[in-house]
Image (cartoon, helix red, strand yellow):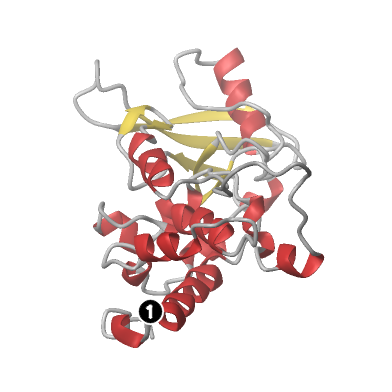
Amino acid sequence: MKVTLRIYRFDPSVDEAPYYRNYAIEAEPHERVLDCLNRIKWEHDGTLSYRMSCAHGVCGSDAMKINGRCALACQKLVRDCEADLILVEPLPAFTVLKDLIVDLTPFFEKVDFIRPYLIAGEPPEKERLQSPEDRNKMGESIRCILCACCTAACPVANENETFLGPAPLVQAFRRIFDSRDIERVERLQQLNVENGVWACLNHYECTRVCPKEIPVTKYINTTKREIKRVFGPTQEKKDTSA
């Protein structure tokens, strides 16, 4: 079948403003948008720039906006686009470096800020055991691949660059509810600020676009309730989603 990809193009070193270019190619319904981008780059226009790595929905590097919805190009099938014209744009909320490549430095700085690693004190002689019940408290948060789709789709993150954002909050959730982590209270305090969990207004866009189907909004609200339980209901007035 013939499909047309309308792709956002912008090279800050050359172009005065962004523009869109159409590429008409042959593609099978079961092929992915990433396959189409590769075909365009390899056979039509070698200047097209985008990120990709594993191409199997694990690395999260090929996140972009496809027909108005943030997604992974390696997971989005041509037949699922439901149109002969597929609009491909960079992730919103981030500075475009070239074409579909955005600067994710601020995103990863916020992830680093919440300390996305286990803090468990001195290493024991044997492994730290964890019961299935304790493991289940972390839910699906361990599936996060830091693709930034959730942050790019979040209306709050698009308006407030100081908001930590959904992905860092999910990474924090994973450690807060890990029975092996010894800095649970300190982690909760870190999020108990205006631009932490309380900036989330429950738009649910993060949950809708997550390629790993993580209930992002649910975990943020769970963290809000845990902060109120540990520190008291002093932050309720800041929680405009309550």
Quadrant containing the C terminus is bottom left
Tell me, yes or no, if residue 209 can be seen here: no
The image shows residue 147 at horizontal and vertical percentages of: 53, 43
How crowded is the residue under tag 1: few (<14 C-alpha within 10 Å), some, or many (20+)?
A: some
Q: Foreground: 115 or 62?
A: 115
Q: Is residue 184 left or right of residue 200?
A: right
**In the depicted structure, whether residue 96 falls above or below residue 172:** above
Quadrant containing the N terminus is top right
Q: Foreground: 192 or 96?
A: 192
Tell me, yes or no, if residue 194 can be seen here: yes
In the rendered image, which residue does mark 1 sit on?
231
Q: Residue at x 46, y 20 (%)?
A: 48
Q: Residue at x 38, y 42 (%)?
A: 107
Q: Quadrant of residue 140?
A: bottom right
The image shows residue 60 at horizontal and vertical percentages of: 58, 39
Q: Residue at x 53, y 36 (%)?
A: 5
Q: Is residue 179 left or right of residue 106?
A: right
**In the depicted structure, whether residue 123 falls above or below residue 152:** above
- Under mark 1, the amino acid is Phe
The image shows residue 173 at horizontal and vertical percentages of: 53, 61
Number of numbered discs on residues: 1
Q: Foreground: 58 or 222?
A: 222
Q: Foreground: 41 or 97?
A: 97
Q: Is residue 233 left or right of residue 167?
A: left
The image shows residue 157 at horizontal and vertical percentages of: 33, 57
Q: Which element is circle 1 on?
A: helix
The extreme left residue here reads 16
